[in-house]
Amino acid sequence: MPSPPISSSPAIIHKLGTRYPLLYASLWFSLGILAGTYFWRPPSWWLVALAVFIGAGSYLAQRRPRIARVFSFCTLLLLGVFMAEVRQPPKRSSPILQFADGSPVIIVAHVTRDGFLRDGGYGGKRQSLELESEQVTSDSLSDTSPAGIRLNIYGRSETRQNAEPRPHLAMPLFTYGQRLKVKAKLRPPRNFGNPGAFDYEGYLASRNIVVLASASLDDLEPLPGFIGNRQTLWRNQIRRSVLNQIHLFWSPQQAALIDAMVIGEESFLDRDTRVDFQRSGTYHILVVSGMNLGILAFVVFWLLRKLRVSEVIASVTTVVLALGYAYLCNWGSPIVRSAFMLTFYLGTRLLYRNRSALNTVGGAALGVLVLDPASLFEASFQLTFLAVLGIAGIALPLLERTSQPYRSPLRFLHLTVYDAAFPPRMAQLRLDLRMLGGRLSRFVGKHVGNWILPATISFILSAYEVVLVSALMQVTLALPMAYYFHRATVLALPANVLVVPLTELLMPAAVVAVGAGYLSLTLAKLPAVICSLALSGITSTVHLLGGVRLADLRVGTPAPLSALSAVAAIALALVLARRRASLAVAGLVALALTALWITAVPTKGNFRPNVLEVTGIDIGQGDSTLIVSPEGKTLLIDAGGPLGPWQSEFDYGEDVVSPYLWSRGISRLDTVVVTHGHSDHISGMPAIVANFRPRELWLGPNPPTNLLSRLMHVVEHQHVSVLQRREGDQLNFGGSVVHVYAPPRDWQVAAQPRNNDSLVMKFTYRKTSVLLEGDAEKQSEKRFAGHMSPADLMKIAHNGSTTSTIPELLAAVHPRFAFISVGPRNPFHHPRPEVLDRLQAAGVITYRTDLDGAVSFYLDGNSLTVKTRAPR
């Protein structure tokens, strides 16, 4: 006879969960890391303080246990400070950087990370891989210091647009350990100089990459030999074998998703797919993280226990397989942390009968931070910790007092002997269900009648639990989602309610299909079909909900007050979740209100009042300029983009301009302007329109192109008013006056965009003004220079090319300041020395985005002041 089920009660749960020393320890250690990061003192200070507190705590341990406990937490804080200060930051310098001047060099290196193929420009292929140099040689220098290199290999060089196809140079895939000799150009990595910009240099440094390189395939020569770790080689071979199996069973579109979900390989995912998952709030499905590992670990542990394997052996086996799975997934940070937390949880499960989920979370977090204090500042750690904390600290106590007490009475319902083990209310429920089951038995049979009611109630309880956990995760993660990703996942709750159960079906089915495929394709068919059906359900849900306009709600960086309120609400909900029902509800309400504040209340823009602001955004070799009017209205001119036909998933509007605007607290633009149709001005604008939903789009005459059609499609979807601007237009914009000087009203467009299509505008506020030219060239400048009045500030046209900025225009405008939007080490050698000399001769103080980063000019009606991100 099975053991009688035991009903859990809130009183028992409250008694078991009143003390969480490991959670407190992780919080104190985190405070120490924060203090050590932002308030530096000599490490010797902290060592002395540590010794004092350890001695005092040891002395008081037996005499004053409570005071000793305080000393122990302070010791953890000091230890966090010490580790934060002595940890070595990733190297961002290397002797190889002396070769990074754009000149060709010869590199002998070996591959440290397998390459992956992508489509390139002009119909060719390109490949990205990571190398470690053995020797770098130029005409006058040679260096043998090892250094990490990220190399992009192109099937055709940019200078060979009209070259004949070369099928004999089909792009091979380069793998770990291969030695290569390549003629390439090196350049140092560079962050965009804007507030809110992604720390690309730091990301590469964390992967030990200090320099970037590009080369053509015909400039590369494989060398004999192997350099590397044999275990890593075997791991990569197994990984490639698994990927081949996946692509054998499923179509390319499905295989790309299964690659990401099962093994963490995202190389084949396109940007549109990523965006759909992000918009629907299900992007965590696409990355191998705690949920993916948890599903597989649960299945393994459950199967082993069903096979009557002891709990110790089942736990050890689950941990070993989880660590092996993390190793196969390249030891990505999220899955390593998840494997560590799983190990800690199963260990405490074996060691303690009365275990606390919050202690487990705190202990796992403390272990991760001790190994790598810098993890505290990573978005993935914060998201994982908050998600697990929300489930363990808020969701579980709520479930234990709502749905869980009803689960045990549903078991062995037909055995009346167990009724006495339950409280009277639950015993009455069992009696009522048996009576209803008896009536149903007359119509569906005794067996079905006894089964259908418990099964139905169990399904309803499961649905309630999924909804509650999903909802709590969304409100708990509202702050980091807004801060790091600027997304309000409005539809994440219904999306996850549908997608998570399907993922629980997909993960084991995919693993079984891949494993069975090595034995027999016939054995793999059934799990492969189950996986395909689950994946179809996931993608249908994601595309349906991700396509809803409400799903694409972007938000600015949360204000400090709202961020602090969200943190306080999470702490309050954790404390009150185990109190009486009214207090627990109050905690949930506070949590929901702060999430609503962050996601639904627009952030207030960080503007100076009563000034006309002009900011040249660092967009590389392109243009993007923010205008903020004296009355606080916002206008963005251009949004950058790649040069030429090269295909890239990097979106300048989404990845460069939008983060800067969000960092300024801008969640909505009043107007956007496209000066002309060249890709380095218009390509990023569709993302800007989608993210900031402007009221108006100003356009000049532009020929029909694919880029313009793409923009107009988004404009129509967002219901943006399109206004044509021409020479002679004059209008008021938020307290400033706008004059349009070009193009002429009778301007005829060509088959392709031209620089002289550019809108030329002058913004005036009282006695101060700025002239913005786009890429206007000499022909256009000569036309309006004769009737141009002076201006305090001038944006230099066409990135400082000699095609623009004629002396007649400089004499007419006579600016005191100028700025040039230009990319570092660009192939056009912009800005040209002739233009810089011309500006210097005219006494113009000139700023450049490649040197100064984002440059802001403030025109208060009488004078002009400047603020740069980088010191001059």
Image: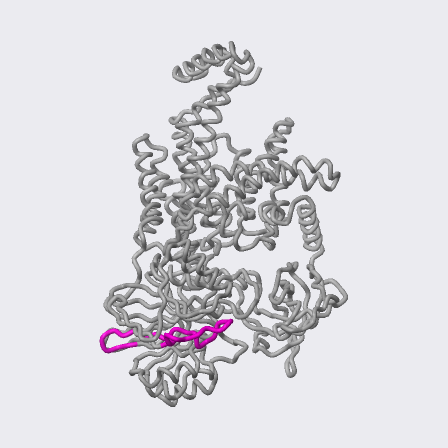
| Total number of numbered discs in the rendering | 0
Q: Is residue 796 above or below residue 687?
A: below
Residue at 68% x, 54% y is 232
Q: Position of residue 866 (x, y in %)?
A: 32, 75
Q: In this view of the protein, which residue sits in the foreground, 346 or 574?
A: 574
Is residue 55 visible to the viewer in this orientation of the structure? no
Asked if 115 appears above or below 71 in the picture, the reply is below
Front residue of this view, candidates 687 and 556: 687
Give the farthest residue toward the right. Answer: 224
| Residue 767 visible to an observer of this rendering | yes
- Residue at 43%, 83% (x, y): give it: 778
Residue 758 in magenta stretch: yes
Return the residue nearer the eye: 163 or 646: 163
Q: How is the image coloured?
A: one colour
Which image quarter is the C terminus in? Answer: bottom left
Task: Give the quadrant of residue 159.
Answer: bottom right
Give the x, y percent position of residue 356: 45, 35
Check if residue 836 falls in the magenta segment.
Answer: no
Where residue 724 appears, as percent x and y from the top left, is 36, 67
In this rendering, would 872 be left or right of 540?
A: left
**Part of the protein shown in magenta:** 742-769
Looking at the rendering, in which quadrant would you find the N terminus?
A: top right
